[in-house]
Image (cartoon, coloured by chain):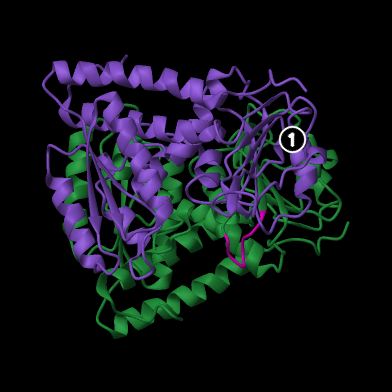
Chain colours: A green, B purple
Amino acid sequence: MSLDNLIDGRAIAKEVHAETEARVAALKADGVEPCLVFIRVGEDPASRVYVGMKERTAAKLGIRSETTVLPEDTPEAELLELLEKLNADDSVHGVLVQAPLPGHIDETKVFSTVSPGKDIDGFHPVNVGKLMLGEGGGFVPCTPGGVHELLIRSGVPVEGAKVVVLGRGNIVGKPMTAILCQKDKHANATVTLCHSRSRDVAEHCRRADILVAAMGVADFVKADMCKPGATVIDVGVNRVDDTAAEKGYRLVGDVDFAAVQPIAGKITPNPGGVGPMTIAMLMRNTVRAAEQQTGKGNPTI
Amino acid sequence: MSLDNLIDGRAIAKEVHAETEARVAALKADGVEPCLVFIRVGEDPASRVYVGMKERTAAKLGIRSETTVLPEDTPEAELLELLEKLNADDSVHGVLVQAPLPGHIDETKVFSTVSPGKDIDGFHPVNVGKLMLGEGGGFVPCTPGGVHELLIRSGVPVEGAKVVVLGRGNIVGKPMTAILCQKDKHANATVTLCHSRSRDVAEHCRRADILVAAMGVADFVKADMCKPGATVIDVGVNRVDDTAAEKGYRLVGDVDFAAVQPIAGKITPNPGGVGPMTIAMLMRNTVRAAEQQTGKGNPTI
């Protein structure tokens, strides 16, 4: 089985990181140290891992980061107050509140409280609205932004392509659709958004030139759902029990890779596909936030 | 040819108006007179007609309206200043700037300056973002909101339906997609958004249970693009030359009605379909704005 149809997310993320590093250097030459603040509430193990990865990447790129960990029972008002303080702090350019939050905290309210200009996750309604309206100037959510970048840098033709997005989450599926439907040379796709209530999903998938799987169902996309030659992007991260694994589970994507890879024109491995791109886009958004807020650096790099 | 498959937009708009009138009455009983301000810039003839229709409808429903007409060469800054004044004026609940604006004025900036809570057109990025995120609480753009209401009140099953939206404009196509893809009992549709760069548009259309034509091409949807029994919604308003007509033109929709009507399960006439609903939703949004801003009236009617 040839693996030369793989879209190497790690390699493409490195390209993006190199560009981001150059922008960090330009900012620093202008006296600006880009700074990103992470907030975790409670000790969700996955959140610890994610924030840790983001911290390390930021450090590698020369972006300063600070992490505030609040206790699980932190009142919502206290978190909102902290966000207002960070919004007003000129030395902080990006603010990321790691989801999921404890049940007593309203995520919608939290994401709407981060100032749109520091909302490097792209979750604030203003940024979502700008994306949808094709206005530019806002922040694009990192995972669908990363998928878009993967497609562009892998030379996958997006213009006029039939795209099927599986999953209508606010973090991936919906913004993915918003990105790809725009009137833009790297977009102009005809997008169909499928979800749990969709009928004939396999049939939709079989027509797709590009299939983006982001519904969170392990190994959902099978060989008979893939048009020969299609590009398949696997966003899923699902835990499945595995007694043979040290932790008692393993992580699998939404695509049955072994079955689909021989048919696909191009396909992301998982891990090593979309994941690294999410972090790369987060760092790029942070540097853009610093550039926008300070008017310094070199955003044209 | 039987016409019993018509979706009567005028009759459904009347139902909505009756509900709005009851809400106006409840507001007035609470001492609140709902008030809507229209702003026109220049003397675009279509804008005059549209604003005039909206003024008359508001008056009929007991909503106070005021219209400010600014000269064609009004500087953008002056319009923005007026908007800020209206945003701060507690006696004004809704503000509508009639598009199109003269070329020297940035529409995006204007629509973003109207306070989101008074943005009864639903064009502010915050309202677009809330719609996309499924958050509720924002204002839904009037035309796609009206189409949605037509579908619901005509008993057209939307859940699980395959919907094709033709046209990706910010006023109709994109928000239509955002409305119908949500996880909601009146939504949950599988939506494909087609546009000028889409390939195989006819084929997409033939699979649609619901076809919403909003691309602004006269008589675009032909009989062979309609699945027998499908619901066809015609949003288009196109001028075509007609020497026989008094004005030298006539208005036609995006759907070749004569050809498609016999095949469609349900179809909107045009005029008399979507148009009346757009105004009905505008009035409903205005009353909702007044209710939200004052905490008075009876929003549950």
Does residue A195 appear anywhere in the picture?
Answer: yes
Q: In this view, does A246 lie to the left or right of A3?
A: left
For disc 1, the chain is B
Q: Nearer the viewer, residue A109 or B129?
A: B129
Q: Which of A59 and B122 is in front in this view?
A: B122
Residue positioned 55% across, 55% down in the render:
A179
Disc 1 designates what residue?
B258
Q: Nearer the viewer, residue A64 or B12?
A: B12
Residue A188 in magenta stretch? yes
* Residue B121, percent from left and from top: 36, 42
**Quarter location, residue B221:** top right
Q: Nearer the viewer, residue A168 or A132?
A: A132
Quadrant where the N terminus of chain B sits is: top right
Is B24 rendered above or below residue B39? above
* Residue A143, percent from left and from top: 53, 53
| Start-end of magenta stretch | A183-189
Q: In this view, does A89 lie to the left or right of A10?
A: left
Identify the main secondary structure in magenta.
loop
* Residue B279, percent from left and from top: 41, 34
Label 1, secondary structure: give it.
helix
